[in-house]
Image (cartoon, grey):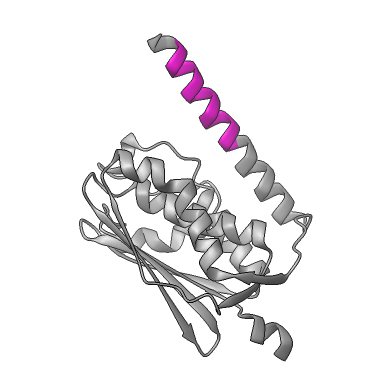
Amino acid sequence: REYVGDILNSGKHLLSLIEDILDIARIESDKIPIEIVSTPLAGMVGDAYVLVQNHAREKSLEIIGTRITEDINLAVDPTRCLQILVNILGNAVKFTPDGGAIEVQPKIGEYGLYLSIRDTGIGIPEDAINKLGTPFEQVQNQFTKDHKGSGLGLAITQSLVGMHGGHMQITSKEGVGTTVTVCLPLVQDLHDA
């Protein structure tokens, strides 16, 4: 049984890697279709929570979310925006030790909606933060060696955010945690364009 579980986990990891490589190839060849529609932020964040909650529960992580009002609508492709949120939340869950916390904070600003996801995880060395948007770059230190990953998740996320006309910022301190903030257009921005 142990071997079957190992084979299943390896298969899932390989499938995830293949999907990430295909996404990078599509992005680089401009073949990812983006259909911008009005998308409720509350529903999008709720869907992302559902997709990471089992792993968060296994690690006894607390996900703290500011109540998002129903009247905030993004001008995004819903499938790709969900992918952005799940990638960021998934990383926060993966790199936050058991019993830690993740906070999701939306704020409307001058250039759109700023959605910050802050964790109490292992953090990232300051000199490595700029590498994180590059495909196949994964920060390696004594904390991350036990976490499998392709190093493609944040590169894909950064590209998808850019395809929406937004931007992504990462701040972090080792042993304290990481905050990833994405800026995405609001529906009003779509009408103003």
Of residue 137 and residue 58, the one placed in the foreground of this image is 58
Residue 11 within the magenta-colored segment of the rendering: yes
Nearest the camera: 168 or 90? 90
The residue sitting at 55% across, 62% down in the picture is 44
Judged left or right of residue 192, residue 44 is: left
Can residue 193 be seen here? The reply is: no
| Number of marks in picture | 0
- Write down the quadrant of residue 57 in the picture: top left
| Residue 21 horizontal/vertical position (percent) | 64, 42
Residue at (79% x, 55% y) in the render? 31
Q: Position of residue 155 (x, y in %)?
A: 55, 56
Q: Quadrant of the N terminus?
A: top left
Vertical arrangement, residue 40 with respect to residue 124, above or below:
below
Q: Quadrant of the C terminus?
A: bottom right
Front-lying residue, 125 or 41: 41
Task: State left or right for residue 158 relative to residue 177.
Answer: right
24 in the magenta segment = no
Res. 35 image quadrant: bottom right
**Residue depicted at 66% across the width and 56% down the height:** 79
Vertical arrangement, residue 145 with respect to residue 8, above or below: below
Residue 89 picture location, percent across and down: 43, 55
Identify which residue is drawn at 64% across, 40% down: 19
Q: Which residues are magenta?
A: 4-17
The secondary structure that most of the magenta stretch takes on is helix
Place of residue 67 in the rendered image (x, y in percent of width and height, measured from the top left): 39, 72
- Asked if residue 92 shows in the view, the reply is yes
Within the image, what quadrant is residue 83 found in? bottom right
Q: Is residue 94 left or right of residue 131?
A: left
